[in-house]
Structures are given as structure tokens and as C-alpha cells.
Amino acid sequence: MPLNRRTFLGRSAATSAGVALAGASASAAAAETRGHQGPSGRQKRYTFTVMGTTDLHGNVFNWDYFTDAEFDDAAHNDVGLAKISTLVDQVRAEKGRRNTLLIDAGDTIQGTQLSYYYAKVDPITGSGGPVHPMARAMNAIGYDAAALGNHEFNYGIPVLRKFEEQCDFPLLGANALDAKTLRPAFAPYWMTRLRTPFGRDVKVAVLGLTNPGIAIWDKANVQGKMTFPGLEEQAAKWVPRLRSMGADVVIVSAHSGTSGTSSYGDQVPYVENAASLVAEKVAGIDAILVGHAHVEIPESRVVNKETGREVVLSEPLKWGQRLTLFDIEVAWERGRWQVASVSAKVLNSNAAEEDPRIVRLLDAEHKKVVGYVNQVIGTCSAAMTAAEAPYKDAPIIDFINHVQSETVKAALAGTAYADLPVLSQASCFSRTAAIPAGEVTIRQVAGLYPFENTLEARVLTGAQLKEYLEFSARYYVQTPAGGDVDPAKLTNASGTPDYNYDAVGGLTYEIDIAKAPGSRIVGLSFDGKPIDEKAQFVLAVNNYRASGGGNFPHVASAKQVWANSEEIRNTIIAWVQAKGTIDVSRFGSVDWKLTREGVPVF
């Protein structure tokens, strides 16, 4: 936290909800750079900057633990808090540290092998356990507050609570409620005073909102413990309170995108990506730091329907690739500070060097994780890659389905469902995932499954499976027969991400992309015969999909016959360790393909 800023977190007896009032004493030199008389020579004006990050997903360094090399992508983005730290220092030097705040919009402790290691391998919850690297880095940088993201709950509430305890700043979630008391389970907001050159402080409030989808995506961790009402509902409750408490400026840090859409259909009566709706419908908000959607929005303006005032939204790109800056000017009018203007922009972290202070602070943890992920655990008979997996039946996806099917078959042995055929769904989570021929390491296997999903078994009929596949096939852009096909323009129709396209192992079928979505699955068969619509099958499926993630039909309401708390990633790693060899000939086959009017596309 900035020097001389005092933070007080008041907690109720039943919850950890709290309010922080922080007093900032600014040097005259720094403050005068942000305060000035208005055009009339009488009106007092003061400008301050709120910096924001989101979806850091465990990235401290510009490093990809899955490739064991510096991170790079087609746009030459860089990642990590070490680079964000340098940008933050530059902004503080320019604006005056006491004229700045630093907040985050969630998804902090999941996403890299660094964050995984300190949740599972050497957990922060262990006796005398370490401090989480993300807490250490964010404390050192001086974050003021952070909203909860949905991935904060992936490792269970005890890990999240320990992370919260280790942070020198509050984790905010006004719509994360205790299931029994319906009171906030975390601090709903944080408040601070910024001292101006005019002897009158500006009181700034930050309201934190998280995603209602947590109730679906992490049902196993939160059911009966916490509930997650909608962002609009809770913002409408808290923003007037903050104004009545004297807040001159209200910032919302929301782990929710701007599109107004949901991936879970009507399973939850709240919108997943609700940030724009909050801006439009809830009066009294000046700016919203947006998260969750992993898109870059330097500045967006939404008109509030009640007041007619513009609310400024900004979403910095994920993993520490961008830093949002909200520049907020207030003017002294009618005996109080009024917001005169708000603007937003983003800074690119690839223009910054890693802060050597952060590098030194966490170098030992980084090296420990690099050593862990490079352990050899087996061999592979042939190289496999996910480069073409989004549009071809690739052995690397067959491998995931093979392990999942074997795991479920073994689990159902001796049960009433042991005789049902077991199928499996898998997605291409990373087009850069690869397993080489020869020695195989933990990081290469883990790279197939970067998410903390667990495995379940659900019973579906043949008819339901066909509808499931039709839904999945929406992923392809409708492409008429004849002419060449550009793979780069073939997938992600209507914004469907790779992880919401499923290939189902154990069935044979064609996807006719010349046809409209909903009528594309051709020749669906099982065991060499057309599928029996009434026959029952067990589907090995990840908990995200089984809980409604992606809004696939039938699976969320299907009978669950088995579930496991072990991450699928660890299940695959353990399988390789137990077998010693990945024999591609045992599972690699072309069971589905893209066609146009019966002619294969590839």
C-alpha cells in the first residue's frame, strides 16, 4: 500500500464484509500537479488516476510454463505482474503516487503452473505453507483492492480464504453472499480519501462485483456455502449506500464482460456479461473496470438511462498484457466534489521491462516451478500436436478422450452402469499444445488441459447425443460446397471459443458445414451401426460442461453416475506415470470429419 495510507477493514460478526476508509496525506508538490483553478479562476478542480488490471490468471513473469520459454503470441504481447509493476511505477511517477489508485477485476489465482503449484503441490493452506506468489507480487506493487473472479473459487474456499488473508488489500464481492445469512461473504466495497491542494478530500469508493456463473462452474465448491445474485441487483443496492456515505466518485470493479450474454442459458437467472447493463441501469456509477471476457476495451461509454450521464468502461487485456488508466477530474460545485470528466485508455506491457524488484522477490518460486514442470514422467510413441485439432480429428484430443473413457470405465466397474458404453468429450484448449515423440514431461501433458476441470459421468440417450453434437457443430462457419476452405476463417462462428467446441470420442460422424447449424451431423454411428436414439450411453464430461458451461443441451440435467474431485490434468499425468508409454496407435483414429455435401473438406 502507498506510504502513509491507513486502511481499516471493519468486519461483521457473521461475515468478512467490510468497509475501508483510507486517509492519504499528499505532498504539496505532488498534489499541485493534479489540482488547478477552473476557467473562471474560482472553481477548484482536481484530477486523479485509477489504474486497473484484470484476469491476471497467475501470471507474475513473462513466461509460459507450458512451453518452458518466454511468453509470445502473434501480436508480440507480453504478460505478467513484473511488467505491470514497471508501468504502475511510471504512472505514479508522472501523476504523483497519492493521486493514483490501483485495482483489479478478478481471476487472479488460477491459470499458470505457478499458481497451480501453490494451490496443489505446495499449497498455501499447508502447515507453515508459503505465501501465494500472486499475493506477494500484488502486495509489493501496492494494490488497493481487487474484485473476486469466478476462477478464485476453483481450488475451493479454504485456498481462497488463505489467499485473502495473505493479501494486504481487500478482495471485494458485493454479490458473493453467505448461503445461510445472505450477508456479504467478502468485503463489498473499499473506500478511500484523496487529499487535494484545496483542503477538501475527494472520497472514492470501489464496489466489487463477481460473476453469478460461479454457482454453476464451481458448484462442488460453493453449493450450500455461498450464493451469487446478479450484478445489477447488487449494484442497485450498494451504489446508493456508497453515495449516502459521502462517496464523491464511485468506481465498479466487475468480473463480468460487456456483451449482455450468458454461456449458461437459463440455468441461472442472472446475466454473465452484465457490465454494460449495470452502467445503463444503475445510477451513480462513474466508471467500471471490466473483467472476465478476455477482450481489450480501451474505452467504452454507456449512457445511464436514469441520469443521462455517460459511464466510462475499460477492460485491459488478460494476463497483465494491458494496464487500464481512468483519468477522473472532479470540480468543486455547490459545496461538494462533482465528477467533471472521465476518460480511459490502456498501456501495453510489452513496452515495459520486468521490474527487477518483483523478479528478485519471486525468483526462487519461479525456479522451483520450472523444475517441477520439467520432470519426465513417461514416453510417447509419436509426436502429437493440437495445431489442427479445431477442424480435424487429432490424436492429441483422442488421447484426452481415451484417458477419460478408461477412467470412467474403471470407476463404474461393478456398478449398475458398468455395461453401458462409455463415450467422452474433449475440447482443444490450446492450439499450441503438443507432446513430442520420446520423453514426456509434466508441463507437456499439463499443457493439454490448462483448466482445473474435474471429471464426471452422465447418462445420455443416442438422440440427446446427436443434439449435443449439433449444438457443438455451431462452432463452424457455414461454408458452401466447392472452392477452397481457409482453416483460419472456418472456426469460432458467432464468437464461439475453441473450448466450447466438443469432439465426442467413441462415436463416428461427419459434420456437413455446407448445411445450416442444427442440421449438420451426418452418419452418426456407434460400433459400426447407426446410433439407436433410445439407447443409453455414459458420457465422460468435465464439470464445467456438466454444470452448464457453454449451455450444451441435456448434459446439465442428465443423471450423474460418478464424479471425481481430481483435476483432469492430474488424471492424465497420473495415467502417463502409471502406463509409462503413450501408445498413439491405441487411440489415434479418424472418427469424425468435416464434409460439404458428402465430400471431405480435408
Image: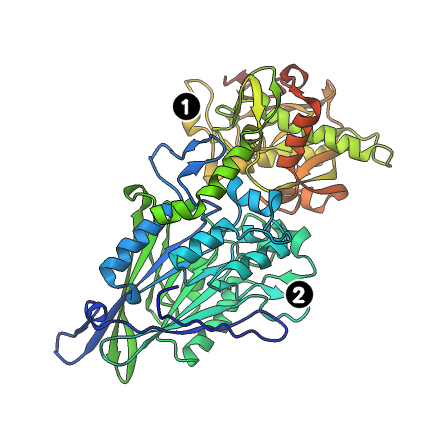
For the question of whether residue 470 can be seen, the reply is yes
For the question of whether residue 296 can be seen, the reply is no
Q: Which residue is mark 2?
A: 179
What is the three-letter code of the residue carrying label 1?
Asp
Quarter of the image with the N terminus is bottom left
Q: Nearer the viewer, residue 182 or 282?
A: 182
Q: How many marks?
A: 2
Q: On the picture, is 120 further left or further right than 317?
A: right
Q: Which residue is mark 1?
A: 486
Q: How far is the residue under mark 1 from the one under mark 2?
A: 50 Å
What is the three-letter code of the residue carrying label 2?
Ala
**Residue for point 46% across, 63% down:** 169
**Residue for point 18% across, 79% down:** 43
Residue 130 lies, in percent from the top left, at 56, 51
**Quarter of the rendering containing residue 527:** top right
SS for dot 1 = loop
Residue 187 lies, in percent from the top left, at 52, 68
Mark 1: few/some/many CA within 10 Å (<14, 14-19, 20+): few
Q: Is residue 161 above or below residue 580?
A: below
Residue 115 lies, in percent from the top left, at 53, 45
Residue 425 lies, in percent from the top left, at 64, 33
**Residue for point 19% across, 69% down:** 29
Q: Is residue 458 above or below residue 228?
A: above
Q: Nearer the viewer, residue 260 or 19?
A: 19
SS for dot 2 = loop
- Say which label, 1 or 2, has the lower sequence index: 2
